[in-house]
Amino acid sequence: MTQTVEPAVEPAIEPAIEPATEPPTEPPTSTEPSGGEGQRVATQWLERFESALRARDVRAATDCFATTSFWRDLVSFTWNLVTVEDRSGVADLLEHNLERTDPTGFTTAEPADLADGVVTAWIEFETAVGRGRGLLRLVEEEGEWRAWTLLTTLHELKGHEEPRGLRRPPGAEHGARKDRTTWAERRQQEAESLGSTEQPAVLVVGGGQGGIALGARLRQLGVPSLVIDKHPRPGDQWRSRYKSLCLHDPVWYDHLPYLKFPDNWPVFAPKDKIADWLESYTKVMEVPYWSSTVATSASWSEETQEWTVEIEREGTPLTLRPKQLVLATGMSGKPNLPSFPGQDVFRGDQHHSSAHPGPDAYAGKKVVVVGSNNSAFDICGALWEHGADVTMVQRSSTHIVKSGSLMEHGLGDLYSERALEAGVTTEKADLIFASLPYRIMHEFQIPAYQAMAEDDKDFYERLERAGFRHDWGDDGSGLFMKYLRRGSGYYIDVGAAELVADGEVKLAHGQVDHLTEDSVVLEDGTELPADLVVYATGYGSMNGWAADLISQEVADRVGKVWGLGSDTTKDPGPWEGEQRNMWKPTQQPGLWFHGGNLHQSRHYSLYLALQLKARHEGLDTPVYALQEVHHLS
Amino acid sequence: MTQTVEPAVEPAIEPAIEPATEPPTEPPTSTEPSGGEGQRVATQWLERFESALRARDVRAATDCFATTSFWRDLVSFTWNLVTVEDRSGVADLLEHNLERTDPTGFTTAEPADLADGVVTAWIEFETAVGRGRGLLRLVEEEGEWRAWTLLTTLHELKGHEEPRGLRRPPGAEHGARKDRTTWAERRQQEAESLGSTEQPAVLVVGGGQGGIALGARLRQLGVPSLVIDKHPRPGDQWRSRYKSLCLHDPVWYDHLPYLKFPDNWPVFAPKDKIADWLESYTKVMEVPYWSSTVATSASWSEETQEWTVEIEREGTPLTLRPKQLVLATGMSGKPNLPSFPGQDVFRGDQHHSSAHPGPDAYAGKKVVVVGSNNSAFDICGALWEHGADVTMVQRSSTHIVKSGSLMEHGLGDLYSERALEAGVTTEKADLIFASLPYRIMHEFQIPAYQAMAEDDKDFYERLERAGFRHDWGDDGSGLFMKYLRRGSGYYIDVGAAELVADGEVKLAHGQVDHLTEDSVVLEDGTELPADLVVYATGYGSMNGWAADLISQEVADRVGKVWGLGSDTTKDPGPWEGEQRNMWKPTQQPGLWFHGGNLHQSRHYSLYLALQLKARHEGLDTPVYALQEVHHLS
């Protein structure tokens, strides 16, 4: 209960996807001139669909979908993040939401495209309360064009449009008046009243990229909010990590909302540079942000429908009473610190990877790193560079891809200079990406990883010869599916895997049995001398943060966070269709989880912010298909 | 010699222009589909022009121009900012520069447009050392399409392309190496060596928007540079001004290089907000910037071809030896502090407008503001808002336009949401704007101001009834021409003019004769009681900075800075064709002047930076038409 929440910000993982403009079996090879057949087909479909919706004819609307089909809705119909499948799913979604949503005005936002039997159309529409954007893919079935995938997203709430572009604020207040207050004075007043005379409607715990991006969106939407973080300055979540850390994601994938990185920004930003950016961004976007502030406990009152959150701001206790509480403390959750016999007698240093201070103190020392995923490799690499004698203990197989290959085969079509040149803006890329149903996403991933396996054949052979146990995921779908399903089990090689392949970083296999005064002993009896043991043993589910801050009861009520229910390793079924509990209502009223890589922080913060805004404005927000709980952690 | 240079940053003035796609007499009313006749004409002209240039046939190249024509070159042909006129000017430019420039590869960058008898074409070309961009306008004369205006600009130097977009830096250094230094370590090393073991090639004195924008460009170009400023933090040039100050220019006009304001940025940013932006920008763009640093003296050595600049950094003396010295201390130059009998006996406060601390201390006090331009109005307005009893002393007539009208009629076609929607990016707007020859610019301005006069008829009548002496510039061309010609004589009304029109701020006329212990006495005997006298009496020429920092001799060698030689009030002839001494070589080797509003700081910093880069790389940079000196101040 008094455990402070640690805003752990993890370097994140890229999706390896092909923009799916084709049905699963046929890659597209040509496009027609715009405004032709594709546009005609899309327009007709939209007219037919809208007509059915207007008539509240669920059967007719459902008939617009193919037998195998996916409708993903982000807040616009469901006040939730939901993917329904096939006609039965579509029918259920409509039966529960159609009347209230009152969708109208479906149009194409630009000329639709027909390629290889798939019509792809950017669409716009309205609902009773908002305006939406989406992406539609139609295929021919039984001589009729039917929806294969439909993405609908809420873009803005009517009457609560963001002050941007034509709606941007005037800034200067022209004219002369004797009661004028300036921007600086208003900012000062706001800073003084927040948390004392004015309660934040939303409290965001954790001020990494996730909390900052959400804070910026809430600020734009006029929702009184506060982001708190334990570190002294925004960006310290990155600054405090090991010194050679750079983002593992490329720049095109990493933009924050509203303010893109300039075009001289490095492909893989060094940690201190991204930290400075986050700090400047927080200031420029006027995100209400309290540094050096920890939340020590929180409780929900059914009666008042608000939280009581105890915090310490620069050591001074304070009670906040927000209506909504967002945990943005890192999708990796709390560190898993394993328990081994002999940890109490070991005389060297030992700590979880998240607490690793960097290599500086360990030149010439013997280091055992338990684990073989991202953190393990990063730490092994930095220790080796500083002259430590490093052994990695691989406990289970790991998936590795080379950073350049991932950029080339995984991200390039959506997030690259090439994509921008082809008109795929960040905003479009985010929607294309969001339009790919999780159910079939692995099918698009597998070929990309097959291509990487081919390109980097020599690398994988060398790794194997060094004894490294490598895998490509349960179904060969690679890194991004592992990220979505379990958030672990991979490494994006930026150099350290070569050290293992070359034998520069030594490799051991198996489970740790116990520690002695000066070594780690594996189950097969192998004894690894050690001055330092790093437990790169991963993280628990994010609801662990809720257990610490609120209660185990609430953590259990919410259940496991992250993962798709894919029934693959560390992602047990049943199938969820969406990432569990992320950016969407949970079984605990007023409790939300936000996090992920920079891409997710950018894109999903919009939908979370709109959900919070709707509640702040008192809109009716009945949640369709509220997250069910199948696993506690 | 020991006078410190004050980086005075002035709020700036917008151009009131119509994008000229027409010959002077005919406004365009229609456009053809792209890729048609206009493109054919442009391509043919470019082929003919290039063929003549390749043959070094000056006569044939000159024949490509109309009898009345203007060629503006920004660095690409002339290593200078030069506008030549008519065929004789074109011939002279070519005779002096053609062989060395070796221009080739003229193409249209996008389909040319034909409207109302003018073909407008965006062009690209190469020279021996660089790549250029430009804008060409052709008119029919004697049955032949000939150039009416040609803008050629140097965009980048071959082999010194900026690391942007596809050339952006990798950031992470993949692989493992034991001698790795991180970004933060390199930044630290650089900070420690700059000015001690490493001399800046370029020293920029003054760290307002001008110095910062130039610093960012030099950083990008890899020129070792240093920007120094007397204030404690970047942005303090704005923070330290009166509290109600907002930019008088709208956001679309104000972007800095590389990093645009986000689309939620206010139209007229409050001073503290723009200050925070400049501070963040300086950090994000990694501009080498020393705060709390003043330059106390500078001298040029003909022998070593470098400057010796004495500075004080946080009070500690230090000597710098840059090759190039840029004065970016404010285009307004040094304050003109008038001398009146009785200033020594006056018992109240008196100061120049640039030293005005703001209105807070003057509630209920009697204030006389001498002057009736921008500063005078801003200060009168703020004092009135704080309950002072304010009298403005108008010494000569002033030009006033309402901010909204200026946006509508002056800027809207180039810098607005409307312009962006029409595809006129900031970069395009800057080039369109730069393509309008100064010689005829007033002709395009006059109608815009006539429209404002009509729109705001009631306002001007009220001003007149209040006794205010109003003018529209010597030739009715309004505010922007006044800005370019003399940098004074106007006010963009954001409210204070209404106070004068309403009599809330009192108005007196005439010259100050003397001060008494407690009043200002005008030549006609009018006595104005005063607790405070503000001298809003303008600024001198920027070469005054050089007099203070270097010597009167060097200031006189350089001569007057700013102005066009239009032979209008405060801008004596002869005609220059460009702004005197701005962003271009001066008669003093290694001395440059940079400044102006945010638009000018953004756009012209590119050409200044390229000139400095070329010199840093040792390229041959023979200057065509070096600035002549006709006036000393």
Image: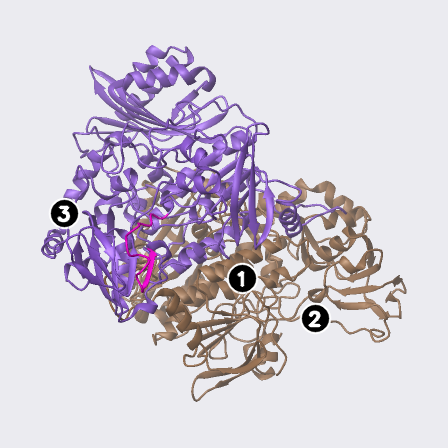
Chain colours: A purple, B brown
Where residue B191 sits: x, y (%)? 44, 72
Where disc 2 sits, the SS reads: loop
Binning the other alpha carbons within 10 Å of mark 1 as few (below 14), some (14 to 19) or many (20 upward) gives many
- In the drawing, what numbered circle is on residue B348? none
- Which secondary structure dominates the residues rendered in magenta? loop
Where residue A548 sits: x, y (%)? 45, 43
**Residue B610, quarter of the rendered image:** bottom left
Give the spatial CA distance, label 3 vs label 2. 73 Å
Q: Amino acid at mark 1?
A: Gln
The magenta span reads A335-352
Where disc 1 sits, the SS reads: helix
Where residue B541 sits: x, y (%)? 62, 71
Q: Which residue in the protein does label 2 denote?
A: B336
- Whether residue B68 is visible to the viewer of this picture, yes or no, is no
At a point 10% along the width and 54% down the height, the residue shown is A458
Q: Quadrant of the C terminus of chain B?
A: bottom right
Q: Which residue in the protein does label 3 denote?
A: A453
Q: Amino acid at mark 3?
A: Ala
- In the drawing, what numbered circle is on residue B209? 1
Give the spatial CA distance, label 1 vs label 2. 22 Å
Binning the other alpha carbons within 10 Å of mark 2 as few (below 14), some (14 to 19) or many (20 upward) gives some
- Determine whether label 3 and label 1 are within 8 Å by CB: no
Does B364 sit left or right of A543 as displayed?
right
Comes first in the chain, label 1 or label 2: 1
Q: Which-is-in-front pick, marks 3 and 2?
A: 3
